[in-house]
Image (cartoon, rainbow, N blue to C red):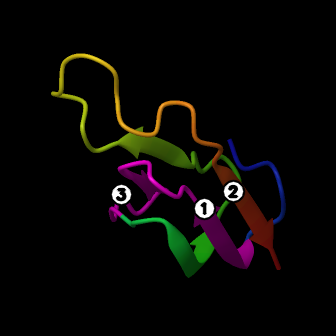
Amino acid sequence: MWTGPEGMYSIVVRADGIPLEWRIGDQKPRTPGGASVALVHGDLIRIERTDKVLRGPLPGRDQPWSIAITK
């Protein structure tokens, strides 16, 4: 949950080899990479895999991922 001040922020999600998307309060799906977004107190930054229907070992399950948020 976002507990920082409201405003425009740069968010960079890195997830090489992991099929995922991320969303914030506007619910717009975004792929890994960078985006400028407005964050308000209480927004959830949701990261979800896009291959949830697969069975067996998930691709990239042991791969590192990161999220960075800067003003």
Question: In what quadrant of the picture does the N terminus appear?
Answer: top right
Which is more toward the observer, 67 or 3?
Answer: 67
Q: Amino acid at mark 2?
A: Ile
Magenta residues span 7-29
**Which residue is labeled 1 in the image?**
14
Q: In this image, 68 relative to 35: left or right? A: right
User: Dot 1: what SS?
Assistant: strand
Q: Amino acid at mark 3?
A: Gln
Q: Is residue 5 above or below residue 19?
A: below
- Give the residue pinned by disc 3: 27
Residue bearing mark 2: 67
Of the 4 image quadrants, the one containing the C terminus is: bottom right
Disc 2 element:
strand
Give the CA distance from mark 1 to mark 3: 19 Å
Image position of 61 with respect to 14: above or below: above
Label 3: element kind:
loop
Looking at the rendered structure, the kind of residue marked 1 is Arg
Q: Nearer the viewer, mark 1 or mark 3?
A: 1
Residue 58 horizontal/vertical position (percent): 34, 28
**Residue 49 part of the magenta-drawn span:** no
3D distance between C-alphas at marks 3 and 2: 17 Å
Q: Which circle's residue, 1 or 2, is located before the other in the chain?
A: 1
Earlier residue among tags 1 and 3: 1
